[in-house]
Image: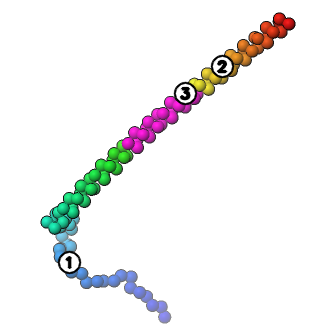
Amino acid sequence: MILKWRAELWLPVNLTWSWEGDSTLQLFRKALSHTQKKRFLATLIAFLVSAIIILATAATAAVSLTESIHTASVVNHMVYNVTHEFQEQVNIDKTILSHLEALKATVK
């Protein structure tokens, strides 16, 4: 014998407002009632402040990332130039050293 439980449970509920109408509008009216007006305004202000903080953080991060990418490209370009200059100096030193060795061989 296999027993099966019910998947849902129905409970009697006593609603103080209509659930069939525009529930969003009724929820908004209830939030603006005299008893909860201060709480609603505090929540709204907190939400707006947090949204502004999130947007400011995102903007700051975007600017910082852009500046970091720009700095990285400048550093890469500078490293390339410095490496090129050092290699050119090594070639010049080799040429001078070979001329110096040739001069020493001539003098001996």
Mark 1–mark 3 distance (CA, rounded to whole Å)? 72 Å
Q: Earlier in the sequence, mark 3 or mark 2?
A: 3
Mark 3–mark 2 distance (CA, rounded to whole Å)? 16 Å
The quadrant in which residue 106 appears is: top right
Residue with the mark numbered 1: 15
Give the number of the mark in front: 2 or 1. Answer: 2
Where does the C terminus fall, quadrant-wise? top right
Residue 78 badge: 3
Residue situated furthest bottom in the rendering: 1
Give the amino acid type for the residue marked by disc 2 in the picture: Gln
Residue with the mark numbered 2: 89
Residue situated furthest left in the rendering: 34
The quadrant in which residue 22 appears is: bottom left
**Which residue is rendered at x = 33% and y = 83% of the image?**
9
Disc 3 element: helix
Give the amino acid type for the residue marked by disc 3 in the picture: Met
Neighbor class of circle 3 (other Cα within 10 Å; few <14, some 14-19, many 20+) is few
Range of magenta residues:
60-80
Q: Are marks 1 and 3 in contact (CB under 8 Å)?
A: no
Name the spot of residue 40 as percent of width and height, x first.
21, 61
Q: Are marks 2 and 1 in contact (CB under 8 Å)?
A: no
